[in-house]
Amino acid sequence: MLEPARYACSNWVITPAALALNEAAPASISDQSFVLVLSGVAVVDFEGEPPNFPWTHQVLHIRPDLNAPLEYAISRHGVPTPPGEPGNQYTREFLVEQCAPFAGVAAFYSPAGKVIGTACDAWRPHHYETRVDAFTSASLHPIFAGIEADLAERTYGGVIYRVNYQLTLVGKIRFAAVIIT
């Protein structure tokens, strides 16, 4: 699996999800659903395989950092946190209710006179993760773990350099215990 070298840019919006007219309000802010939108550009260096111009396939794992949007929502809306320091005693997580990902090739290079072919054939959520709730010790699943994009490249010496992504998520903010084994 291919991982981005870095992210050229990343953007986010997080806001409480609106309730339907007949829907009961959450019992506490901890039960509030949020809409989280993540977008950006993943920097990759995916080169096709020589010599006969076959399609070269690779799966790119895009996992934007959720710390800034989750910290914003936690601070803005007064979501209670477990005791301790984030990263040391607990991690901020997003428990997914709905996910709508998108990814596409944004930049590629092909030597002059060479056959060009690039594709982003499909995208989907990466396998969701399971954690342990820092408050209750209950199982937390499905935890957001990024998306996968199926890339393909067909040139001799060609390189896919950038992949755009956008994720729209609906879910809840949760805190997972840091377990040292």
Image (tube, rainbow, N blue to C red):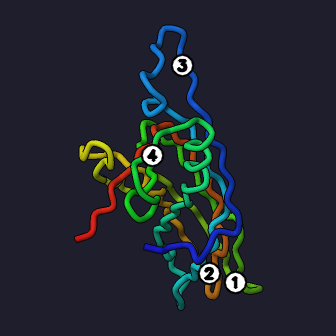
Indicate the position of residue 154 as horizontal and vertical percent values.
58, 76
The secondary element bearing badge 1 is classed as loop
Q: Amino acid at mark 2?
A: Thr
Disc 3 from disc 2: Cα separation: 50 Å
**Residue sitting at x 33%, y 61%:** 178
Dot label at residue 114? 1
Q: Name the N-terminal-most of marks 1 and 4.
A: 4
Q: Which comes before the other along the chain, label 3 or label 2?
A: 3
Which residue is disc 3 drawn over? 19
Mark 4 element type: loop
**Residue 53 image offset from top left, x and y in percent:** 55, 82
Q: Which residue does the numbered mark 4 point to in the structure image?
A: 81
Above-or-below relation of 76 to 71? above
* Coordinates of residue 84 in the picture (x, y in percent): 41, 57
Q: Residue furthest right?
A: 112
How far apart, in angstroms, are the residues tagged by discs 3 and 1? 54 Å
Binning the other alpha carbons within 10 Å of mark 4 as few (below 14), some (14 to 19) or many (20 upward) gives: some
Identify the amino acid type marked 4: Thr
Residue toward you, 56 or 72: 72
User: What residue do we see at 65% from left, 53% from top?
Assistant: 39
Asked if 171 appears above or below 101 in the picture, the reply is above
Q: What's under tag 1, amino acid-wise? A: Lys
CA gap between label 2 and label 1 equals 6 Å
Q: Which mark is residue 155?
A: 2
* 45 vs 36, nearest the viewer: 36
Q: Closer to the N terminus: mark 4 or mark 3? A: 3
